[in-house]
Image: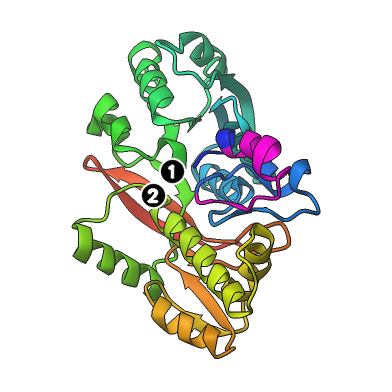
Amino acid sequence: MASGVTVPVAESVTCPNNVIMISPASTSPLITVLPADQGKDFLFRTCPSDALQGVVAGQLAARYNRTAAVLYVNNPYGQGLAEEFKKSFEKMKGRVVAMVPHDEKAAESYTAELRKALAQNPDRLCAFSYPEHAKVYLKEAIEFFKFRKFLFCDGTKSIDIVKALGPRNVEGQRGTAPGAAKGEPYFMFANDYKDEFGQLPPLPFITNAYDGVAVVGLAAYAAKTKGLPLTSANIRDYLRIVANPPGEVIYPGEFGKAFELLKAGTPINYEGAAGSVDFDKNGDVVTPIEIWKYKKGEIVTVSIEFLR
């Protein structure tokens, strides 16, 4: 679920042993070019790389700010997002005045890091961490440094932030996150989920996780119809066949239909709840990026951005 976990597990366990892994939430750009997987093709993800989120975040910040500082968790996720944001923001003529990492283990205070990040009085502070870090340092930024202009990401898209800072202190402030396209497949998934379990939780990557399970199951079934043993290599070889065009489109929940088509030898193309699951040669997908904001103590979508 996190780049800081996916990368070492892929390097030391799954890739060396030719075991397929699909992450629904690990967005570090490093995963695209992970040396342990180059030429082996056992590492996939159903969420976009932060090479995409960073571009949109940089563009978003540049609409309203000339300078920015970045406070980020020092792991593959935070590093990758911070670097991609910097490139994008500076391409849009903005200037990043500080890039300040903090430890992955949550601390009781971040005043030293904040002092570095805010030394040049940036227009915006990017909070590229997780809730357990950000709820501490954002509260300190407000109380000790009188600073209230933040940019959030998927890691800091959390009601825990609202509870820690208070709704008034985050009202209207925006962030980015991998987003669902919210076309017909998304609504099919969301409606079925609500019918079964009640309200869809306001958490990221639920749709991406569903799509990961779906394509593994479809690829396994496709291999089975060809009389192949269900090895990682065989399932991997059918991932792109069941998830990429061409083929008859399959939406979330239409697995009975998909099985019948596969048994008949008819190609399928799974269109996921989070968007198209069209894997490229690196096992990456290009999915939408959501711009969201805090509004009256809730998290609401502002827009869905597509990069191609």
Which residues fall within the magenta stretch? 6-24
Could you tell me if residue 90 is visible in this image? no
Label of residue 23 in the image: none
Q: Is residue 119 magenta?
A: no
Q: Is residue 13 magenta?
A: yes
| Residue 210, x across and y down, in percent | 42, 59
Query: Looking at the picture, does residue 301 appear above or below residue 92?
Result: below
Which of the 4 quarters of the picture holds residue 265? bottom right
Helix, strand or loop at mark 2: strand
The 10 Å Cα crowd at callout 1, few under 14, some 14 to 19, many 20 or more, is many
Who is closer to the viewer here, 10 or 102? 10
| Residue 250, x across and y down, in percent | 47, 79
Which residue type does callout 2 highlight?
Trp
Which of the 4 quarters of the picture holds residue 93? top right
| Residue 94, x across and y down, in percent | 63, 38
Who is closer to the viewer here, 268 or 274? 268
Name the residue tied to disc 2: 292
Name the residue tied to disc 1: 175
